[in-house]
């Protein structure tokens, strides 16, 4: 394959990967608005007694962090961690 065609194929692959990532992020954002996720989130917050499981903070906004995305839509408590915003930001910075 000529070099210019290889370069174009590589660019097309990158463009496709970028569009796919945008779509996945959009679907994830939608999932976070569903009644199912809201129930799962509340279940996990209750299990953690509405406290950050990293620092113990409880008088702040708490997020429910996915430790992985393999069980998205079928999350168990062990797949999630309750974190305050600063700890949630740190968790994403580490991964």
Image (spheres, helix red, strand yellow):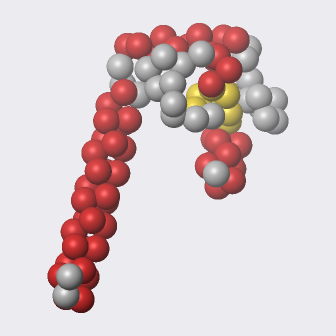
**Residue 47, image x, y percentages:** 70, 11
Q: Which residue is drawn at 59% across and 10% down?
A: 43
Vertical placement of 17 versus 39: above or below?
below
Q: Can residue 61 be seen in this view?
A: no
Residue located farthest toward the front when viewing the structure as drawn: 1
Q: Is residue 53 visible?
A: yes
**Residue 23, image x, y percentages:** 28, 45
Vertical placement of 2 versus 69: above or below?
below
Residue located farthest toward the bottom when viewing the structure as drawn: 3
Q: Looking at the picture, tell me which residue is in the foreground, 94 or 51.
A: 94
Q: Which residue is drawn at 24% across and 80% down?
A: 6
Total marks drawn? 0
**Residue 4, image x, y percentages:** 19, 88
**Residue 65, image x, y percentages:** 60, 33
Q: Which residue is drawn at 52% across and 14% down?
A: 40
Q: In which quarter of the image is residue 50?
A: top right
Q: Looking at the picture, tell me which residue is in the foreground, 80 or 87.
A: 80
Q: Which residue is drawn at 73% across and 17% down?
A: 48
In the rendered structure, the answer to whether residue 91 lies left or right of residue 16 reads right
In the rendered structure, the answer to whether residue 15 lies left or right of residue 88 reads left
Q: In which quarter of the image is the N terminus?
A: bottom left
Q: Quadrant of residue 59?
A: top right
Vertical placement of 83 versus 15: above or below?
above
Q: Looking at the picture, tell me which residue is in the foreground, 79 or 35.
A: 79
């Amino acid at each position: 394959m000529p070099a210019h065609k290889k370069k174009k194929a590589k660019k097309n692959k990158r463009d496709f990967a970028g569009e796919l990532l945008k779509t996945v992020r959009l679907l994830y954002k939608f999932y976070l608005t569903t009644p199912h996720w809201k129930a799962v989130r509340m279940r996990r917050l209750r299990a953690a007694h509405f406290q950050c499981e990293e620092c113990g903070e409880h008088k702040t906004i708490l997020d429910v962090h996915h430790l992985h995305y393999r069980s998205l839509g079928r999350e168990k408590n062990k797949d999630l961690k309750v974190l305050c915003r600063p700890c949630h930001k740190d968790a994403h910075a580490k991964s």
